[in-house]
């Protein structure tokens, strides 16, 4: 969709993985591939997890709706995979619990709560509020990630990178111990819960626009991490940090680079707060420089992997959290999420 001159905006909530002891990413299709797991956005709505991914709203399923405030309604989705597209008179969004790693032997549970406006009118560029409540025991090393509930930009992509001028992001998230949303993330509470997870933007790029839309086939994955919680959650290339850094609106990011098991080149910008055990709960700014900075780098700068080019396409962009494991129920909340892609 276009707002003003050349402003394209659209947001979608979907699932992805990031991080893990092997260089994790789930919600970050690369991690799945690196550990022999199923690709992300594949298949339709399911309750048995056989074809996780989904992108369309269906009837039935393991979810129910309540009306907590006049003019709004909250729907809880405990399905393994369910594409949720709330009706909107402006931008359209799609959400998904995306419990792609849950099996018959998995111990734990995850539900996504989505708050929507009955009049279908949202502030420009703004996604519905959502939260994810979950608890899982640690999974096997071959499949450490259980789910990646998220929001993904849809329809406006793919776009040629050199046709973009700005990728503006405005978000606020929190993580708390227990079944309710919290106003501020507490490191002590999350350590006590033995939480292992991350919070990140995940993007896929390729010189072929069709491949760029597929997290499994794309040549490049570029991530932006706002949280790295627990020892099991690590970006690919952790042991070989690049010397590159970038400050965006007061937030410092450090670059890690490496190759996952399926041969994709993965570049992860991790906020300095996350690197040091903290969190970047709020961020507002243009993250497009985190892509364009890569153009001027060489393989020597990126631990022997090739950087993307301005001639490539951005085919997929998502924001979410990857559920590894937790000793207690925890709640990931996103009260604010906006993204504008300007051309």
Image: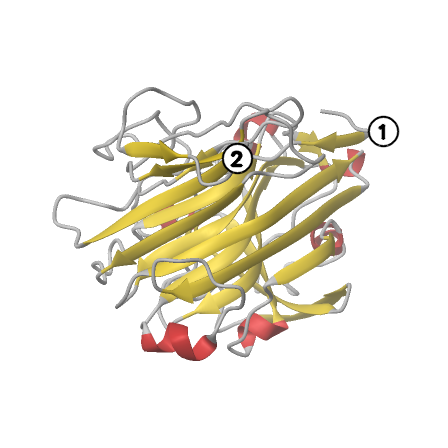
Mark 2 and mark 1: Cα distance apart in space: 32 Å
Give the label on residue 4, or none: 1
Q: SS of the residue at dot 1? A: loop
Question: Does 43 sit above or below residue 112?
Answer: above
Extreme-right residue of the structure? 5
Regarding residue 29, the answer to whether it shows in the image is no
Q: How many marks?
A: 2
* Colour pattern of the rendering: secondary structure
Question: Who is closer to the viewer here, 305 or 144?
Answer: 144
| Relative to 222, 20 lies left or right | left
- The residue that appears at 63% across and 53% down in the rendered structure is 171
- The residue that appears at 21% across and 61% down in the rendered structure is 137
Q: SS of the residue at dot 2? A: loop
Regarding residue 209, the answer to whether it shows in the image is yes
Extreme-front residue of the structure? 70
Question: Does 276 sit above or below residue 33?
Answer: below
Along the polypeptide, which appears first: circle 2 or circle 1? 1
* Mark 2 crowd level (few <14, some 14–19, many ≥20, 10 Å Cα): few
- The residue that appears at 64% across and 61% down in the rendered structure is 282
Quadrant in which residue 329 is drawn? bottom left
Give the label on residue 29, or none: none
Would you name the residue on which mark 2 appears? 70
């Amino acid at each position: 969709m276009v707002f003003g001159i050349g402003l394209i905006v659209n947001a979608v909530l979907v699932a992805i993985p990031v991080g893990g002891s092997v260089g994790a990413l789930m919600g970050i299709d690369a991690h799945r591939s690196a550990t022999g797991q199923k690709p992300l956005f594949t298949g339709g709505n399911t309750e048995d997890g056989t074809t996780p991914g989904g992108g369309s709203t269906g009837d039935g399923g393991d979810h129910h709706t309540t009306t907590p405030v006049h003019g709004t309604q909250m729907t809880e989705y405990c399905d393994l995979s369910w594409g949720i597209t709330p009706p909107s008179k402006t931008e359209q969004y799609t959400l998904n619990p995306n419990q792609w790693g849950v099996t018959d032997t998995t111990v734990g549970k995850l539900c996504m709560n989505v708050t929507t406006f009955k009049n279908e009118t949202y502030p420009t560029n703004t996604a519905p509020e959502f939260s994810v409540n979950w608890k899982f025991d640690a999974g096997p090393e071959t499949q450490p990630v259980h789910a990646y509930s998220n929001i993904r930009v849809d329809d406006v992509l793919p776009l040629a990178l050199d046709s973009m001028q700005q990728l503006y992001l405005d978000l606020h998230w929190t993580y708390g111990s227990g079944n309710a949303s919290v106003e501020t993330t507490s490191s002590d509470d999350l350590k006590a819960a033995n939480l292992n997870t991350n919070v990140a933007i995940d993007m896929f790029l390729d010189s072929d626009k069709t491949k760029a839309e597929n997290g499994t086939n794309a040549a490049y994955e570029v991530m932006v991490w706002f949280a790295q919680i627990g020892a099991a959650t690590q970006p690919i290339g952790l042991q070989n940090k690049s010397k590159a850094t970038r400050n965006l609106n007061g937030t410092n990011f450090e670059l890690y680079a490496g190759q996952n098991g399926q041969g994709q080149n993965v570049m992860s910008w991790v906020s300095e707060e996350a690197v040091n055990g903290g969190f970047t709960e709020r961020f507002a700014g243009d993250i497009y420089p985190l892509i364009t900075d890569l153009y001027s780098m060489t393989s020597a700068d990126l631990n022997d992997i090739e950087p993307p080019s301005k001639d490539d396409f951005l085919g997929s962009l998502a924001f979410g959290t990857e559920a590894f494991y937790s000793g207690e129920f925890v709640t990931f909340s996103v009260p604010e999420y906006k993204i504008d892609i300007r051309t």
